[in-house]
Image: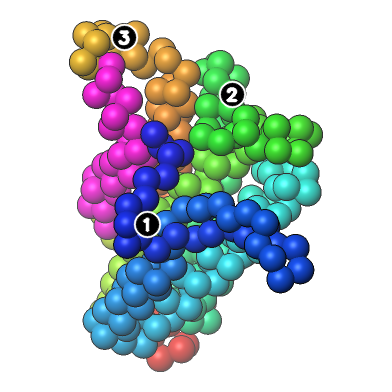
Amino acid sequence: MELDKFFKVGDIALVILDVKGDEIKAATAFDHYRLNIELILFVLFALFLVLFARWTGAKTLLSFVFTVVVIWKVLLPCFLKNYDPILVSLGVVTILTMVVMTLIGGMTKKSLVAFLGAFFGILLTCGLSFIFFPPFHVHGAVRPFSETLLYSGFPYLNLNRLFLAGIFIAASGAVMDMAMDVSASMNEVIKKKPDISVKELIGSGFAVGRAVIGTMTTTLLLAYSGGYTAMLMLFISKGMPISSAVNINYVAAQILHTMVGSFGLVTVAPFTAIIGGFIYLKWGSDHGQR
């Protein structure tokens, strides 16, 4: 049923036409036409974002659109052309992180600290993915449509490396969020107390990171597991013990995804705090562009 289309009288469908000259040979209902409601939803999102956050909201919207374009026009086409998914993903995520941080924070020390903290957090997530992937004995085909992709003219794709790339791509957004939270907080601290020591400033960054980590880790867990509720409900309805459920490849892959992403999120806070402690006090804070 997940791939079926159900139409009733009055529905608007997206139709593929087989045309020869002026004659329509065949018409196939591809799916419901949703572009109009999707555009309405996006416009509402953009409107409320700009109204609430104003100039920052406009920059956020620009970074959102830029990310969508880069994923659709750069990341995915490079995957299909069989460029190494790990290297491509690292390059794309690094560029996206740099652009997003600069758009939101400007050309400032705050953006630099946030970028470096996020970058090292993403690198650590990538490294952990390589370390724990073999012991989990899962494979890239657990992702929806992965096998279909192989049979659609792309048998050369390495699904395992695509799976690994997906782990730190998915975690990169939360990592950027955490890095900017810690960096912005440290920037505010040094504005209020310019004579603060490196140790004290790093300690402030750690304190902010500890406060944010609690909710952000749970956010990742809910985001990753939300799409698997029906599967987990099925396991429970069949009386499957949790010790059996966590050994199923789909569940194990999700555990790997969640735990590695969360570990990278936990470590990005101290990375950002340590980097910020030295950059802010060595080169001065962004206050007054000193």
Is residue 132 visible from the viewing direction of this image?
yes
Image quadrant of residue 162? top right
> The magenta stretch spans which residues?
208-235
The quadrant in which the N terminus is found is top left
User: Residue sitting at 44 percent across and 68 percent down?
Assistant: 35
Identified by mark 1, the residue type is Met
Q: How is the image coloured?
A: rainbow
User: Residue sitting at 51 percent across and 53 percent down?
Assistant: 29
Q: Position of residue 186 (x, y in %)?
A: 34, 68
Identified by mark 3, the residue type is Ser
Contact flag, marks 2 and 1 (Cβ < 8 Å): no
Question: Of callouts 3 and 1, which one flags the residue occurring earlier in the amino acid sequence?
Answer: 1
User: Residue sitting at 73 percent across and 47 percent down?
Assistant: 80
Q: Which residue is mark 1?
A: 178
Q: Nearer the viewer, mark 2 or mark 1?
A: 2
| Residue 139 numbered tag | 2
- At mark 1, the secondary structure is helix
Image vertical order of residue 48 relative to residue 130, above or below: below
Identified by mark 2, the residue type is His
Question: Of callouts 2 and 1, which one flags the residue occurring earlier in the amino acid sequence?
Answer: 2
Q: Position of residue 241 (x, y in %)?
A: 26, 8
Residue farthest front in this picture: 23
Q: CA distance from mark 3 to mark 1?
A: 33 Å
- At mark 3, the secondary structure is helix
